[in-house]
Amino acid sequence: KNKKGSKSKSLLKIVKHLCSRGLYDKALQVANDIPANNYKYTSLFEISKSLYIEGMYDKAIQVVNKILDKNYKTNILSKISKISKCKYDEALKLCEEGLYDKALQVASEIPNKEYKSETLSKLSKCMYDDILKLCGERAYNKAIQLANKIPNKEHKLESLFKISKCMYNNTLRLCDMGLYDKAIQVAIKIPNNDYKSKSLSKISESLCCKGFYDEAIQIANKIPHESHRYETLIKMSEFLYCNRLYDEAIQVANELNEKSKFELLFKISESLCNCELSNKTTLIYDKVIQASAELSNELNRSKIVFKISESLCNNKLYDKAIQIVGNISSTYYKSKSLFKISESLCNNKMYDKAIQVADK
């Protein structure tokens, strides 16, 4: 027994010496080897006390929790609790003054978990309320910066959603006023992708209706959600097609998926059958054929070129019609095109040429 006590006493002295040198991990290893409980608890108390003095509260709590004796444990924990209360009050005061970075720094130093959790929750609520004020002032950049600092995940998400909604409503207002550049600046910074997509979609459609087609396509391609992006492009293509702005509609077609692109090009090729011949119409013929060449479906490509050849026949551009038939890969549509050309030539008493086409 005396040997056990003597060893414990010696190891306690070593622990105190190591603590004075700041070698807490080594001191803890030695303390764990002390055989007598009273000396062991004293050693752990000395380590936790030193850690407390150094402001290493989390580590002090870890060490003190190894002590089974309540008297030793209570001494340190009560001191740590007082520190926690002081830092809790300090953090809330800083929060009221709007000094959130400092408040969060103080809150992170609170050793007691319950106090820390409550402090961070109150800071989050205070920051959220301030964000609502910033949104009302349209100070969106400051609001987003503040929201990203909120420690509580639920409050952070709610804040970013609220900011996004306010920014979306502002882009609608700016669009109605024709202030597109400002609307774009706001929309691009919206943190929520759903609201960002809706905002950019609205701007793109508005630009298209006002005749700013290139800008409208550029903005549409910045829409983060694919479904919103395609929906916007399709609306734009419908608007352009209905207003016989075929050149611009073809530009939009090149941004669409395979199915939508074919449907739009086919509608344009059908409409061209009823258009009067002009230099512009001829250029559009070429652009439709060029755009359709990128379609992967052979039958769809053939349908479009067939319609173009029909339109060329209606305008008596037989040489060009014969020339583009070479782009038709479908045997059925190629034969149909040649028959239409030959029939049209006969109707116009161009029999020799009709025979030549029939022989193809």
Image (spheres, rainbow, N blue to C red):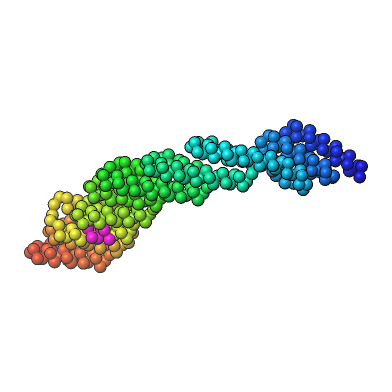
Q: Residue at x 12, y 59 (%)?
A: 316
- Asked if residue 271 is positioned above or below residue 211 in the image, the reply reads below
Give the magenta-colored segment's residue range.
263-268
Q: Residue at x 32, y 44 (%)?
A: 183
Camera-side residue: 195 or 284? 195
Quadrant of image for the C terminus: bottom left
Camera-side residue: 217 or 257? 217
Camera-side residue: 18 or 218? 18
Residue 269 in picture, x, y percent from top left: 21, 59
Residue 161 in picture, x, y percent from top left: 43, 50
Residue 26 appears in view:
no
Quadrant of image for the N terminus: top right
Residue 261 in picture, x, y percent from top left: 30, 57
Name the main secondary structure of what is drawn in magenta: helix
Residue 215 in picture, x, y percent from top left: 28, 45
Report the side of 194 relative to 283 (left or right): right
- Asked if residue 107 is positioned above or below residue 315 in the image, the reply reads above
Q: Residue at x 75, y 32 (%)?
A: 20
Report the side of 161 relative to 321 (left or right): right
